[in-house]
Amino acid sequence: MDWFQTVVLSTVLSASWSAEDLTFPPGFMFGAATAAYQVEGAWNVSDKGESAWDRYTHEHPEKIKDHSNGDIACDSYHLWRRDIEMAVELGLHFYRFSISWPRLLPSGYPNYISEDGKNYYSNLIDGLLEKGIEPFVTMYHWDLPQSLQDLGGWTNPLVADWFYDYARVVFTLYGDRVKWWLTINEPLVMCDFVYNNGILAPPIMSPELGAYLCSKNVLVAHAKAWRLYDEEFRPKYNGKVSVANHHVWFDPLTPDDAELAELAREDCVGKYTHPIFSTTGGWPPSIEKVMEEVSLKRGYKSSSLPAFTPEEIALVRGTYDFYAMNHYTSRLIRKAKEGETFTAWPLGDAVDLGGIVQRRADWPLSTSFWFYVYPEGIRRQLVWLRKQYGNLEFVITENGLSTYAGLDDQDRIDYYKNYLRQILLAIKEDGVNVTGYTAWTLMDNFEWMDGYATKLGLYEVDYLDPQRKRTPRASARFYADLIKKHALDSVTVAPPNVTIV
Ligand SMILES: *[C@@H]1O[C@H](CO)[C@@H](O)[C@H](O)[C@H]1NC(C)=O
Ligand SMILES: *[C@@H]1O[C@H](CO)[C@@H](O)[C@H](O)[C@H]1NC(C)=O
Ligand SMILES: *[C@@H]1O[C@H](CO)[C@@H](O)[C@H](O)[C@H]1NC(C)=O
């Protein structure tokens, strides 16, 4: 771009920015999120069963940046009243948290329900409702009962029935009070991250098989739970159920890579959304084709991506009441050169697609190695989804920035402002029906392989304090103010000032 274009473009952009309407639509909901293993602690109290994350962090402390685990975490199992207070301080419309399967069903099966587990979530739900805050419940956020992991976990097709049985317990206990449900959090991470990289629980490397068995089983499990709700619980309770997917937005490096970028979007997102949200159902045809070719080339007799039967396609298709989108980051992709070596997708390259994945030079790196900041990515992802699947109701179920410690987190505020502004543009300019936004996360917590070294909280948590004191950051005040005004009061033109590590 020459200087003339730059000047003209920036003039046009700043003119439109100053006139921009920064108000959110009436009824737009704001929330914040956490997940059970990341905040609850109390890993072995009462009759709680062991989870795959308990097992993993105990046996492999070296896999976690600071060799930590979630044994105590934020101790939300005991400090949930303070968590509700924080939600009140922020003025949240909803609080998204997850239920720990092995806390509720210690054996993994519904043969026995933990009384303490049952009461813990019941009290949390009642406490939120008393304050006028909607509980927004994730049924599964990665802490599989170890007993089921021992039987193959998400690679065993029976997991869909195990999850269905667990879902029935959850809907029966809490369906009267919970109107917003997510069955499963981020199939991409549970399947592709896990089996491609071996850096999350369970530490099993199986990129050519395990990842794809998991992909199919997760979709069937979600669908069975959704249909259970639809048939037996919706008539009484009239809530909404969906699945929260992880979205990495892909741009092509050069115009020549446009087709590859589209394939990467289908691989990263479409694999988990086409079966549910498209009118035809089943795997995205482009991914089905690539997987068949790649599998045969690798010497398998058939595609490693297990086929759906026609019955399964029908079972999974249409199992949603809204679209739940977690989004943090974006990538560039280009065709690999002859003989170029790959590192495994999704943290590295798109191995199956023959794509090399990289960062655009002007995208700042956060404190998480996988996480670059590109606010426009969230808008482009929303527009893509709308184009693929129509005019759905979208709720952003996770978005936020990882940083180092400190209460004056202007970088996090910049991130929120820039990403929220792009969401407003998607709503107002592109007509995408986004009805809610969830900040990840309410407070610092156990950030998986980063342990406690990386911070994403609106509240700082003091892990040296046995009381796990929570203190609001500048971003908490920003978020409370935004919610109160139902509008951004300004937008930041400069990219977020993130410390480059
Ligand atoms: C629970 O785990 C902690 C370590 O996090 C250990 O010190 C304690 O003894 C365990 N308690 C029981 C009842 O097993
Ligand atoms: C957005 O979705 C909500 C929930 O389904 C619906 O009530 C509302 O009418 C939709 N708005 C638009 C502009 O489509
Ligand atoms: C970015 O942050 C650093 C460290 O917090 C600070 O020294 C610097 O002045 C900031 N730059 C801008 C442009 O705000």
Image (cartoon, helix red, strand yellow):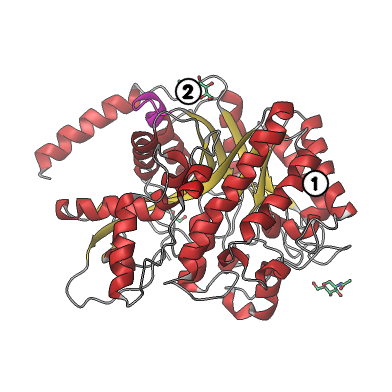
Is 9 on the left-hand or right-hand side of 37? left
Looking at the image, residue 159 lies above or below residue 94: below
144 left or right of 247 in image: right
Q: Position of residue 118 (x, y in %)?
A: 84, 49
Q: Residue furthest front?
A: 310
Q: Is residue 20 magenta?
A: no
Looking at the rendered structure, the kind of residue marked 2 is Thr
Could you say where residue 10 lies in the image, as x and y percent from the top left?
A: 22, 35
Q: Give the amino acid type for the residue marked by disc 1 in the picture.
A: Tyr
The residue shown at (40%, 42%) is 378
Q: Position of residue 57 (x, y in %)?
A: 66, 73
Residue at image location 41% in from the left, 72% down from the top: 208
Quadrant into which the C terminus falls: bottom left
| 247 relative to 209, above or below | above
Which mark, by number, is residue 121? 1
* Viewer-side residue, 212 vs 115: 212
Tell me where residue 274 sits by quadrant. top left
Q: Which residue is mark 2?
A: 23
Residue 190 in the image: above or below residue 125: below
In the image, which residues are magenta?
425-432
Left or right: where does residue 277 sit relative to residue 471? left
Tell whether position 427 is magenta: yes
Nearest the viewer among 273 and 430 is 273
Residue positioned 28% across, 30% down in the render: 14
